[in-house]
Amino acid sequence: MRDHGQLRQEDMALLTGLSQAFLSLLESGQRRLTNIDRIIVLLDGLNAPIDFTGPMLRPTPIASDLPLLAAS
């Protein structure tokens, strides 16, 4: 994604809220991004297109016209 957007690691850090050092470790393969919350932060910070990420890794908007169900 960084190469595609022609971004520096520092740019990615600003966009995603992840540290430049952490991003460097990810790119070098020394760390893995396994926490889904961090993955979503990364994708949202980059405004990654769904065709790059798949819809399962993106938050879905809640439809406001659907009735809410009361818990019993």
Image (spheres, helix red, strand yellow):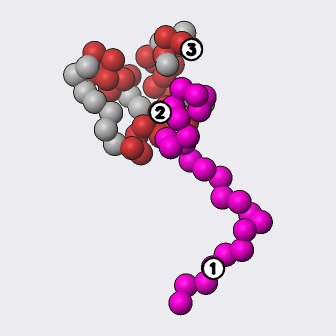
On screen, residue 71 above or below 30:
below
| Location of mark 2 (residue) | 42
Q: Give coordinates of residue 53: x percent, y percent.
A: 51, 31
The residue lying toward the viewer, choosing from 17 and 54, is 54
Kindly identify the amino acid type of the residue bearing the numbered disc 1.
Answer: Leu
Residue at 47%, 33% (x, y): give it: 42
Q: Depth-wise, is mark 3 or mark 1 nearer the camera? A: 1
Q: Which residues are magenta?
A: 49-72
Dot 1 or dot 2: first in sequence order is 2
Query: Around disc 2, counting alpha carbons within 10 Å, would you say few (fewer than 14), some (14 to 19), or many (20 or more)?
Result: some
Residue marked by disc 3: 5
Q: Earlier in the sequence, mark 3 or mark 2?
A: 3
Amino acid residing under circle 2:
Leu
The CA distance from mark 1 to mark 2 is 33 Å
Q: Are marks 3 and 2 in contact (CB under 8 Å)?
A: no
Q: Which disc is residue 69 wearing? A: 1
The majority secondary structure of the magenta stretch comes to: loop
Disc 2 secondary structure class = helix
Residue drawn where x is 40% and y is 40% of the image: 38
